[in-house]
Image (cartoon, rainbow, N blue to C red):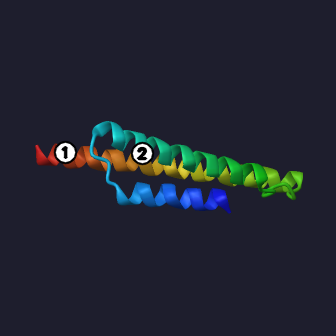
Amino acid sequence: MRARSFARKILSFASDSQPTSHFEIRFMEWIKDLSDKLIIWLLRTTSRFGKELTRDGKAEQAAWREQRLRNLEGLAIRSRERFRDKNKSAS
């Protein structure tokens, strides 16, 4: 209970006071990034997601993951090309 009330006090302090200097802004962003990474790490280490997959299921998951990455790379390339075309036409 004490840790929870301490966390509430810290969070309410952080939301009530607005950072004014560049250092404070960067520090708050660093704290947010660190907390996000810690939460993600905790969820991944305590999760049993994927543990029940068979060898074939793991191979299929890996294939789908690779396909999604290829799709994202293709989208990024097309987006860069469209942006480059817009800049050429505007010039």
Res 66 visible: no
Q: Quadrant of the N terminus?
A: bottom right
Q: Residue at x 46, y 41 (%)?
A: 30
16 or 64: which is nearer to us?
A: 16
Q: Residue at x 76, y 48 (%)?
A: 45
Q: Residue at x 42, y 47 (%)?
A: 76
Secondary structure at numbered mark 1:
helix
Q: What's under tag 2, amino acid-wise?
A: Met
Q: Residues within 10 Å of mark 1 (few under 14, many from 20)?
A: few
Secondary structure at numbered mark 2:
helix
Q: What's under tag 1, amino acid-wise?
A: Asn
Q: CA distance from mark 2 to mark 1?
A: 36 Å
Q: Residue at x 37, y 40 (%)?
A: 26
Image position of 73 (left or right of 69):
left
Q: Which residue is mark 1?
A: 87
Horizontal and vertical percent for residue 7? 56, 57
Extreme-top residue of the structure: 23
Q: Which residue is mark 2?
A: 28
Mark earlier in primary sequence (2, 1)? 2
Res 31 visible: yes
Image position of 10 (left or right of 15):
right
Image position of 63 (left or right of 4):
right
Horizontal and vertical percent for residue 4? 62, 61
User: Do residues under tags 2 and 1 come within 8 Å of each other at their CB atoms?
Assistant: no
Horizontal and vertical percent for residue 82? 30, 50
Which numbered circle lies on residue 40?
none
Q: Quadrant of the C terminus?
A: top left
